[in-house]
Amino acid sequence: MELESLKYVWHSLEGKPAGGQSSEQEIIALLHKRSTGPVAKMRRNLLKELILIIATYIPTILLYLFDFEGKLSGIAWLFVLLLILFAGYFYRKNRLLKEMQCVSCRVRSNLERQVATLKKYTRFYTLAGTLMIPVMTIFCYLIIRWKFPLPPGSALFYRMGGTPWWQNPLLWMSVLAPLTIGIYYFNVWYVNKLYGRYIQKLQELLREMEGE
Amino acid sequence: MVLLLKPFYLQKPATQEEFVKLVQEHRPMLYKVCRLYCFSEHDRQDLFQEIIIQLWKSYPKFRGESKFSTWLYRIALNTAISDLRKQRRRITPIDPDHLPTQLQDMQYSKEQEEQLQQLYAAIEQLTEVERALVMLFLEDKSYDEMEEILGINQNNLRVKMNRIKEKLRKITKEAAYGIGKS
C-alpha cells in the first residue's frame, strides 16, 4: 500500500459537508456539554474535594464557635487557620490545572507543557499531602495541650517527665515521625497510581516527537 | 477583549452561529481525526464531542495569527493525542449503516473501500504521533504547515514520514500474507 495512492480515496471522504438543520443543532447541543478530557476531570475532582472540605469544616467551626458557651472558640480559630491553608492548596492546584493545557499551541509544545505542569502538580500533591499530616498533628497537639490539662488530683502514672502523657511532645514526635514517613510513601504510590501512566505516556509521545 | 473575558455561554449568538458554520465546513476533517484515533463508534463520538468543546472554548482566543485550518488541526490533534482514556478496543467493521450520518452519502467504489479498510487497519498499528503525520500527509499539507501544527522541524518530519511509509508498506504486506495472524 502506497500512501500517495490513497490520497485520492482519502479526499473522496470529504463527501458532502453536513448541511442540514439537524446537524447544526447537533453541534449547538455539543457546545453545552461538559468536557470529559483528563484535565477537565481533574478540575471537577478538585472542586468536589473543595466542597467536601468546606462542608465538613464550616459546621465544625460553627460548632466550636457557638457551642460549649464559647469556651472552645480557640479550636474554631485553629480550624479557620487550617481552612486558610487549604484555600492556598486549592488555589495552587487549580492554577496548575489551568496552565496544564494549551490546545491551540503546537502539538509538541502542548505536550512539553503538559508533562512539565503535571510533574509540578504531582510534586505539589505529594508534598502538600505529606505536610498535611504533621500540620494536623501539631494542631491536635496544641488543642490537647491547651484544652485538656491534667485533671486536679489525677494519679501519678498519668505523668511522664512532669507532664500528663498526652501532653508529652516526645510521645507525639515518636508517633508523628513514622506516620509522616509512611504517609509520604503512600502519597508517592498513590500519585503514581493516579498520574504515573499518564505522565509516562506523554513522555513517550514527546520523546517520539523529539527523536529522529 | 470583552469577548475574551466572557464565559462561553455569554458569547454573542452571532459568534456561536459563525462558529457552528466554520465547524460545519470542517466537519469531515474532524470525523477523519476521530476515525484515525478511535476504534469504536462510541469512542469516536466521545472524541468528536471533546474536540468541539475544546474548539468552542478556544474560539474566542483565535485571532487569525495562523490559518483557521492550522488552528483547527492543532486543537483536534492536541485533543486526540492527549486524550489517553482507555479505548474500547472493539474494532467494528465498516458498515454503511453505522457510519456517521454525514459520511453516509459518500460514494466510493468497492476497491476504494477495501483500500480504506486496509489503511485504517494499518493505521491502528501506528503510534499517536505517526497517525497525526499520516493524517496531515493525506490531507496534502506541506511540511511548512506540518511544522506549524506539530512543532517538529521539517528535516525530522521528512525522516519520520519516510519511516512511516515504510512501516505501512510492511504492515499491509504482512496483512496480505497473513503474517502475525493467529
Image (spheres, rainbow, N blue to C red):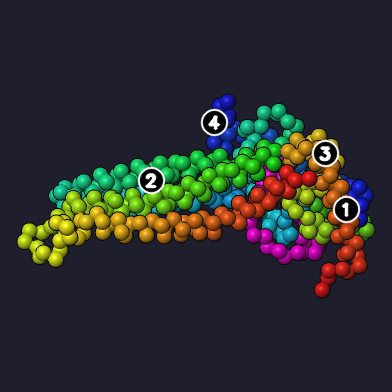
Give the labeled residue for mark 4: B5
Mark 2 to mark 1 CA distance (whole Å): 54 Å
Near mark 3 (Cα within 10 A), the count class, few <14, some 14-19 or many ≥20, is few
Mark 3 to mark 1 CA distance (whole Å): 17 Å
Report the amino acid beneath label 4: Leu
Near mark 2 (Cα within 10 A), the count class, few <14, some 14-19 or many ≥20, is some
Q: Which numbered circle lies on residue B151?
A: none
Residue B52 visible, this angle: no
Residue B163 visible, this angle: yes
Residue A54 x, y percent position in the rendering: 36, 49
Give the labeled residue for mark 1: B166
Q: Which one is in front in this view, the residue at disc 3 or the one at disc 2? A: 3
Q: Which numbered circle lies on residue A86?
A: 2
Give the labeled residue for mark 3: B155
Which numbered disc, 3 or 1, marks the residue that appears first in the sequence? 3
Q: Which residues are magenta?
A: B74-101
